[in-house]
Each structure stands twice: as C-alpha cells, then as structure tokens.
Image (cartoon, rainbow, N blue to C red):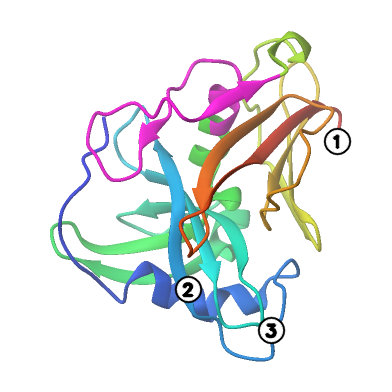
Amino acid sequence: MAVVHRTTMEPGKLELLESWLPTRPWYVPTGSAPVLSRAGGFRLDDPEGEVGIEFMVVTDGSGDRPVTYHVPLTYRGAPLEAPHEDGRDALVGTSEHGVLGRRWIYDATGDPVFVAQLLALFQGRAEPQAQSETDTPDRTVARHGDDALPPPASPAGRSTVSDGPDGTAVAVPTADGPLTLTVVRVLDPAAPLPAHPSVTAPWKLPDGTEHRSPFASLRTGS
C-alpha cells in the first residue's frame, strides 16, 4: 500500500513538467511556456512498495484554449539501472521530498514497474487508488471491453517505448506473444472509446467542468 504524504517537493511536479512537456512530440505548442494546473488522476500500488505510480492529469492554460495532458509518473528513491535503459531516458527530473528525501521522477511509460502494473490493471489484478488519499480505492476509474482482453500475461522482457504525435505505445513482450499498451497523452472530452480494451477516468477543466476520457488501451501484437 502506497502512503500519500502531506509534505513538500522541491522543485514541484508541475514545475518539472513545465520544462519537460515541450520536449515531447505529443506536446501542443501555444507560443508561450506552459502554465500548468492539476486536473485529476489516480494511483496504482507497487506490490513491492518501492515505486510510486501516479496517473497525473494537468492542464496547460498558456494558450487561447486549455490543453489537457495525461502524464503518468513514477517516483523512485534511486535512479533506474540497467537493463532498464528506456526508463533512464525517461527521466523527468529529481526533486527533494519533505519526508522521503531525493526522488527520481520518470515518465512512467519507461518504467518497468508501471508497465507491469498497468497491465495488471487491465487484467483486474490491480485496484486503482485515490490520487491524494492513502489506502482509498478510486471507484471512478473504469475498465471497458473486458470480454476482448488477451489471456492474462506478465512482461517477459524489456518493453519498447515509442512516442508519437498522438501518444505513447509500449510494446510489452510476454510468454504468450507481444502486447501493446497505448497511453493517451492529450485528453479530448469528445474522444470515443478505442476499439480495444481501455481504461477511462474523469478529469476537470479549469472552469470545473468534468469529463471522462480514455487514458490507455491494450491490444495483442506489437
């Protein structure tokens, strides 16, 4: 069970993301530096209790209209080491946590713990947790298309991460063949459910309007 600490982080998550987001191929330029606010999200527990896993949603209000991003993050007490080179490339930055000390913060798609737990979420083996409360399930997170899920499987090697203009694809090798997790990056209130099994969750615009969008989908193949 992950413990949510009521403390400070320096620099804060939004500050780190304001520098990191413009380096991503799925970032939507506004002509100005990002100005971010929190817009929602949830967490998953690491069974080993070592890695924090957060599905963070942030809205950039620097342009003519807000753009909302889904940025899953992992928090570690030490840098990712080989053979997880994808994760090392995914470093967002480091921050000093008021309770836990220095934390290495990663774009979660490059972290093998996140990949395993997102796959477990699709398979019903991981329970979504509230973003800001300890030991509190988040019942607003929903799975869709369970009847089309591939057979239960666990990662059997290092995943391959591909960022594109529409999101991030994570090719996961398993003993039963490859799977692909697709992580949605820019959240669209009008986006339909994908044809493949998906996970959706709610988020809010700065005016308080609540929406629900796909955060990730899963399909067989690479």
Please give the range of residues in magenta. Answer: 118-144
- Placement of 136 over or under 65, stated as above or below: above
Answer whether residue 129 is magenta in the image.
yes
Is disc 3 in contact with disc 1, using a CB cutoff of under 8 Å?
no
In the picture, measured across the screen, residue 60 lies left or right of residue 56, that is: right
Does 176 sit above or below residue 94? Answer: above
- Are there few (<14), some (14-19), or many (20+) residues within 10 Å of tag 1? some
Q: Where is residue 49 in the image (x, y as percent from the top left)?
A: 29, 34
The residue that mark 1 highlights is 222
Answer few, some or many: residues within 10 Å of disc 3's Cα (few below 14, many 20 plus, some between 14 and 19).
some
Quick check: 177 above or below 13?
above
Indicate which disc, 2 or 1, sits on the residue closer to the N terminus: 2
The residue positioned 60% from the left and 49% from the top of the image is 109
Q: Mark 3 points at which residue?
A: 30
Chief secondary structure of the magenta portion = loop
Q: Are marks 2 and 1 in contact (CB under 8 Å)?
A: no
Label 3 and label 1: CA atoms lie apart by: 33 Å
**Residue 155 at x, y percent in the picture:** 63, 27
Q: In which quarter of the image is the C terminus?
A: top right
Q: Who is closer to the viewer here, 121 or 174? A: 121
Q: For the residue marked with disc 3, what is the amino acid?
A: Thr
Task: Name the disc covering residue 36, or none.
Answer: 2
